[in-house]
Image: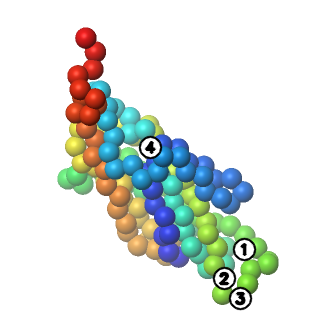
């Protein structure tokens, strides 16, 4: 199993085995005050051999502060039934979406989303982002 895409995005969904992502690749977010909701989703796409999808594979996601303090954990399962019409050696693309919109960020600063895929036959991977104050981009808010 290999990760083919991992994106923090405004919204994502899986429909009929296809991944739809809106505003993907977020590395910065701006809030007027903290604590504030993260407001993002995690879209993942895996390339999987047909014999690997029959067994359920756990995908564990942690949202952490820059010093490693865990803020939230989400667990997804990757499992399916391989189609019967695959070409010899063909692999499957399997999408999964994890909703992180309600994760509370305590303050402005660096954060990371750690994807622990070891139990799913993959590796540990990390996406990072910076949370800042909206006034840093838009100037002072309000009167």
Q: Mark 4 points at which residue?
A: 40
Q: Mark 1 points at which residue?
A: 82
Among numbered discs 1 and 3, the one appearing first in the sequence: 1
* Residue at position x 72%, y 57% in the image: 16
Residue sitting at the far top: 143
Badge 4 density bin: few <14, some 14–19, many ≥20, Cα 10 Å: many
Q: Considering the numbered disc 3 on the image, is that residue within a helix, a strand or a loop?
A: loop
* Residue at position x 25%, y 38% in the image: 132
Measured in 3D between alpha carbons, the distance from the residue under mark 4 to the one under mark 1, in whole angstroms, is: 30 Å
Q: Do the residues labelled 2 and 4 touch (CB within 8 Å)?
A: no
* Residue at position x 48%, y 43% in the image: 10
Q: Name the residue under label 3.
A: 88
Residue 49 sits in quarter: bottom right
Among numbered discs 1 and 2, the one appearing first in the sequence: 1
Q: Where is residue 126 in the image (x, y as percent from the top left)?
A: 35, 62
Q: Considering the numbered disc 2 on the image, is that residue within a helix, a strand or a loop?
A: loop
Q: Name the residue under label 2.
A: 90
């Amino acid at each position: 199993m290999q990760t083919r895409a991992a994106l923090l995005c405004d919204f994502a969904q899986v429909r009929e085995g296809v991944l739809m992502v809106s505003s993907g690749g977020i590395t910065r977010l701006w809030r007027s005050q903290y604590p504030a909701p993260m407001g993002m989703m995690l879209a993942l796409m895996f390339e999987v051999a047909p014999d690997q999808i029959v067994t359920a594979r756990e995908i564990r996601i942690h949202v952490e502060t820059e010093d490693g303090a865990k803020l939230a954990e989400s667990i997804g399962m990757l499992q399916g039934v391989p189609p019967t019409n695959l070409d010899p050696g063909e692999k499957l693309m399997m999408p999964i979406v994890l909703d992180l919109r309600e994760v509370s960020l305590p303050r402005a600063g660096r954060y990371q989303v750690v994807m622990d895929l070891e139990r799913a036959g993959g590796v540990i991977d990390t996406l990072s982002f910076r949370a800042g104050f909206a006034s840093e981009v838009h100037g002072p808010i309000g009167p």
